[in-house]
Image: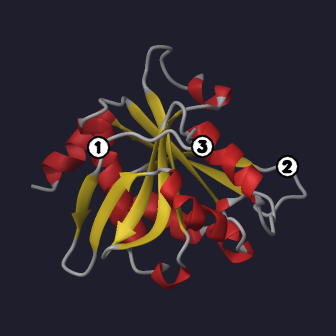
Amino acid sequence: MSIIRSHDITLCGGNDEYKVILCPLSDEHLPYLYKWNSDSEVLYWTEGEDIESYPPEVVHQIYGGISQNNLCFALKVNNEIIGECWLQKMNLPNVKKMYAADADVRRIDMSIGEKSYWGHGIGTLFIGMLVKYAFECEHVDVLHCFSEDYNIRSRRVWEKNGFQLVFTEEIPQPHKGKVQYHWRLTKDEYQERKIESF
């Protein structure tokens, strides 16, 4: 029996330097997930708390759980698996209350596990692909995403993809971050941005 529930969606994009493919995350990617989730430097940027390492059984719990009702992708760049991302239904009640009860509100979580690819603009590329898919194929109403004050790279990814900072909230201490930023992109904002780019 599979740990990760997969799907059949593949997204292709990139630029002249990087060929980017978002392929269905599956059990064949578990060795990568074990590696990245046992690297404290990678986890520093993906987890709110300081986590040194996650054992395989926790990795199974995380990805086995999230993949049951959401789309999880492996990130392939120039034919190398370098990270993963999720397009998931909003799971935070305080955020869901901000929107109409029948609105399809999703969030994106992402991680580039291969550190040699950090700082090359790849996050902006593949999040742009996922945003396009969310609005044009899944017909999502709102994407509502997060970053904390210490993660400047994450903040830039949302900004470069047209997300607006809708509010900030202080994080109860002690905690690695002091402030959490909430980023929003609506279907109408996405369409307007698309028209302006032509």
Q: Earlier in the sequence, mark 2 or mark 1?
A: 1
Q: CA distance from mark 2 to mark 1?
A: 35 Å
- Judge left or right: residue 64 versus residue 169: left
Please tell me which residue lies in front, 40 or 91. Answer: 40
Picture quarter with the N terminus: top right
Please tell me which residue lies in front, 181 or 6. Answer: 6
Front disc: 2 or 1: 1
Q: What residue is disc 2 on?
A: 172
- Judge left or right: residue 102 versus residue 179: left
Q: Are marks 2 and 1 in contact (CB under 8 Å)?
A: no
Q: Which mark is residue 133?
A: 1
Q: In the structure shown, which secondary structural element does the residue marked by tag 2 occupy?
A: loop
Q: Earlier in the sequence, mark 3 or mark 1?
A: 3
Quadrant position of residue 188 = top left
Kindly identify the amino acid type of the residue bearing the numbered disc 2: Pro
Front disc: 3 or 2: 3
The x, y position of residue 45, in whole percent, is 65, 67
Residue at figure coordinates x 31%, y 34% from the top left: 187
Q: What residue is disc 3 on?
A: 3
Please say if 20 is above or below 1: below
The x, y position of residue 53, in whole percent, is 78, 66
Please tell me which residue lies in front, 58 or 122. Answer: 58
